Image (cartoon, grey):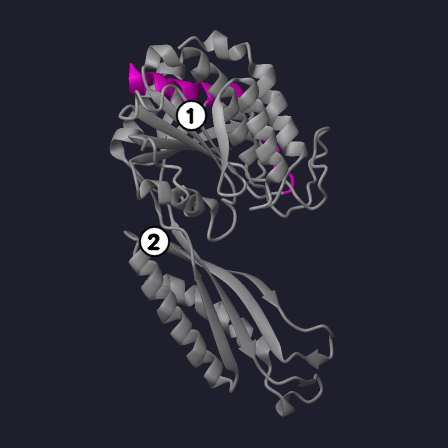
Amino acid sequence: MNYNEIKEIEHKIIEYRRHLHANPELSFKEYETQNYIIDVLSKLEIECKSIGNTGVIAHIGDVKKYSDRCIAFRTDIDALPILEDTGMLFCSKNKGIMHACGHDLHTAMLLGAAEILKKNIRKYQGCIKLIFQPAEEVFPGGAKKLIEAGCLENPTPKMIFAQHIDPDKEIGKFSASINKSMASTCEFKIIVKGKGTHASTPYKGIDPVLVASNIISFAQAFQIRNNNPAEPIVLSICAVNGGIANNIFPDKVEMLGTLRSFDEEQRNSLLEKFAEKVRLLCEVYDAKCEFQINLGYPPVINDINCFNLVQKSVIDLFGNNSFDVCSPKMWAEDFSYYGKEIPSCLFFTGTNPIGCKEIYPLHSNKLNPSEDALIMGTSVIVSIANNFYI
């Protein structure tokens, strides 16, 4: 692969990223983003079309002739309901919406790679499928919807890859997990129903705030006592809402949380067990409980052959010290659905400037990945295609 060829279009990749960052859209509402992607691909004379309402699918190469030599790359295109606080000149124009998970970078890198892959497709003698997927950030996710719409058909790829930025890693560092990569997740909502009363007469009511506080404490104990180090779980209650005054006990308190595991069966059984215990705990205080479960994404499991291809592609470009085998993350990603259909690998691209001590995590309103990572991530996509075909 000619790295200089990619370097020549670095300004385009940066332009793509900045446009996407300035114009973020929420999940399943990525209409302008979809139009922008189609416009870029059309100018590159790449066959593309909308799919799944706000997604885009594109093919480079002869689909019919090379149906048995197809590789796919997937990126996510949606943003988050976050008010940006980065101070960048190209910050979000849509108040309260921000690309705070790197999807603007992911998309820009795949658009950049598309131009290079288009120029070199003849030497590959294959077909490359590009999937620009909506709604990675919300259940039930866009991946399932696109798969149902046929994104992995005509032709079916032999392998599929996705990359995700990692703000904890320095620029020039890439990583992937062997086998287990990201956790299976679910969301739950607990509604504790009590009986409102005045703060001076708690004995006349049922205090749902007290019950909720006990549930939070119990959740930590439940996690510790049910956590097998070989199959870890993370149980988190992240939102507690109830009450409007300092002298009135509310009628109810609502709690939101997640449970994550690398085993779907373990996740489901533990969640049911937790729900049962929470209901019993509410009964102790004479409160009633409503426990709602929304099962989420399966775990992301990297195929070993796909992993080896990513590792080789990174090392070919940037040397042995550029790639690490990383531990599984308790994050969640609907890229997992593709892996249930065909061999897949999700890898991570470092975006933190070398020597930078102030690191803002994913989903932070201050997240500001370095654009120096764009050309490197783009290069890895192209290198994967090269090593797949050559």
Asked if 117 appears above or below 34 in the picture, the reply is above
SS of the residue at dot 1? strand
Quadrant in which the N terminus appears: top left
Q: Position of residue 146 (x, y in %)?
A: 43, 42
Q: Which residue is mark 1?
A: 59
Q: Would you identify the image quadrant in which residue 173 lies?
A: top left
Q: Is residue 251 left or right of residue 180?
A: right
Q: Position of residue 354 (x, y in %)?
A: 54, 23
Q: Are marks 2 and 1 in contact (CB under 8 Å)?
A: no
Count of marks placed on residues: 2
Q: Position of residue 351 (x, y in %)?
A: 53, 28
SS of the residue at dot 2? loop
User: How much space separates mark 2 and mark 1, taking CA atoms?
Assistant: 39 Å
Report whether residue 354 is seen.
Answer: no
Q: Which residues are magenta?
A: 365-390
- For the point 59% across and 18% down, which residue is it? 12
Q: Any magenta on residue 164?
A: no
Label 2, residues with CA under 10 Å away: few <14, some 14-19, many ≥20: some
User: Which numbered tag is attached to residue 232?
Assistant: 2
